[in-house]
Amino acid sequence: SPPNLPGWDEIPVCRILADHFHIPVKLCNDADACALAEWKFGAGRGTKNMIFLTFGTGMGAGLILNGALYSGACGMAGECGHIRLAEEGPAGYGKRGSFEGFCSGGGIAQLGRAYAEKHLPLPWCETENDLETITAKSIALAAASGDPAAKEIMAESGRRLGQALAVMIDLLNPEKIIIGSIFQRSEELLRPEMEKVIEQETLAQNRAVCRVLPAELGDTIGDIAALSVALY
């Protein structure tokens, strides 16, 4: 089942919908579908080699390579959230220190709770009772308002984002990496540290041809992604 939809094991979604609506049905994960949408209608227009990163509830990649969606041998290509970036850290995909652990809504909330447990009270978490109310959104809002601790939490996520992007840039040599959701909304909090790490870690030739951009389609991306899968 999808990591963030526990219990959805071996459910024939396509067959159920096809039987109900009497039309052909395709199933595609969110990262691949959004990659198609941004490639055809958004920030990736005109590219042949592009990566889309979800950076929302979870972290996954959709890969456009040599002008086509790349799904891999069993449809699992792009599961970058499972990559370990550190021995310890917030958990994503059930793995501590993973890319999803550092760069997802749940992961940023874990970073915030870990910090708050040691430094109460904080403007965005005054008591232990507030720990479970911490979200990526509340941390980003506090950081945007200038709170030093919240800014550092977002900076750490930005550094880890840069660490993972550096690997992708050197491994796949894309023209663009397009990032949705949290990056799209909090780019100014994440980009400075992200760019520092990319500058330090990537080959100059690969870095020179790659632009990292926020997703262009905004809140409409889900609808356009579904249509893009049907059209592909």
Image (tube, rainbow, N blue to C red):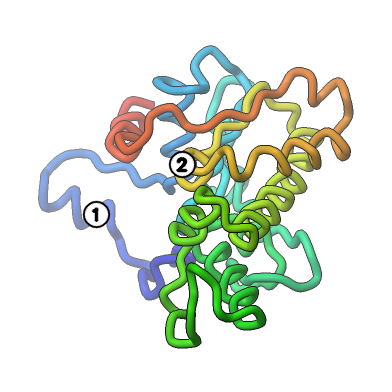
Q: Earlier in the sequence, mark 2 or mark 1?
A: 1
Q: Residues within 10 Å of mark 2 (few under 14, many from 20)?
A: some
Where is the C terminus found, in terms of image quarters? top left
State the mark number for residue 2.
none
Q: Name the side, left or right, on which 205 lies relative to 58.
A: right
Q: In this view, does 7 lie above or below 38?
A: below
Tell which of 212 and 191 is nearer to you.
191
Which residue extends farthest top?
A: 46
Q: Mark 2 points at which residue?
A: 185
Front: mark 2 or 1? 2
Q: Which residue is pictured at 44% across the width and 65% down the height?
A: 4
Q: Is residue 231 above or below residue 83?
A: above
Q: Name the side, left or right, on which 104 lies relative to 40.
A: right
Tell which of 83 and 97 is nearer to you.
97
Amino acid type at circle 2 is Arg
Q: Which residue is pictured at 32% across the width and 42% down the height?
A: 26
**In which quadrant of the rendered view does residue 204 lie?**
top right
Q: Position of residue 91 (x, y in %)?
A: 62, 71
State the SS at label 2: helix
Q: Where is residue 210 in the image (x, y as percent from the top left)?
A: 71, 23
Q: Position of residue 40 (x, y in %)?
A: 43, 20
Tell which of 21 and 117 is nearer to you.
117
| CA gap, disc 2 and disc 1 | 36 Å
Q: Name the residue under label 1.
A: 15
Q: Which residue is pictured at 52% across the width and 48% down the height?
A: 144
State the SS at label 1: helix
Q: How crowded is mark 1: few (under 14 residues within 10 Å), some or many (20 or more)?
A: some
Q: Is residue 88 above or below residue 2?
A: below
